Image (cartoon, rainbow, N blue to C red):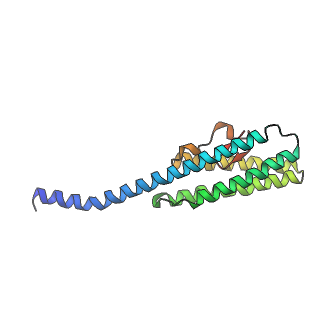
Amino acid sequence: MTAHADDAVDRHETAPRSGASARRKKAKARWIREANALCTGATREARVLARKYENASGLEDVLALGEATLQEERRFLDRLAGLKRPTAERSLIRQMLVLYETHHRVFRRTVSALRRNDIEAALQAGLRADDLMTDAQEMLAFQLGARKCGATASSRGNGPTLGVASIG
């Protein structure tokens, strides 16, 4: 084989990989754009809820905020889970979604404990929910690249969260 033929074979052998690599990068970029758009919307919704309940005057207002947050978060999680997942990140996305779903269940327990006036249980569940949210946000932003979904310093213990948005 000539040097030119060797080069042609090398190009041919790497072309499918390059094409596959380009498709993977394009799929990941699409997923990141879509996840960032969802996070931007969730942040907007969280701010609306924060303004609506910024002068909460009692347990009923706190419960109403918790219920509204759970509803908006459920919509966010369903949309996030519905995004077409890039092949290379499917496992990591699945892990991140498990964290978010676990957070959602624990946050639901927080609201239920408040409804029962079990403040100790509400605080314990709320702290656990905050930790789970921060872990999920960090995975989404830093490991998966959706930077608009990043956890902020204010998300730990300083307020309710909606999807990926801290409103504390």
Residue 148 visible here:
yes
Which residue is found at the position 36% from the left and 56% from the top? 21
Residue 159 visible here:
no
Q: Quadrant of the C terminus?
A: top right
**Residue 149: x and y, percent?**
58, 45
**Residue 164: x and y, percent?**
64, 47
**Residue 26: x and y, percent?**
41, 54
Occupied quadrant, residue 16: bottom left
Left or right? Give the position of 73 relative to 58. Answer: left
Q: Quadrant of the N terminus?
A: bottom left
Which residue is found at the position 46% from the left and 54% from the top? 28
Question: Considering depth in this image, is 135 or 158 the residue closer to the camera?
Answer: 158
Question: Considering depth in this image, is 33 or 160 the residue closer to the camera?
Answer: 33
**Residue 138: x and y, percent?**
59, 46
Question: Considering depth in this image, is 151 or 72 the residue closer to the camera?
Answer: 72
Placement of 102 over or under 161, stated as above or below: below
Left or right? Give the position of 71 relative to 16. Answer: right
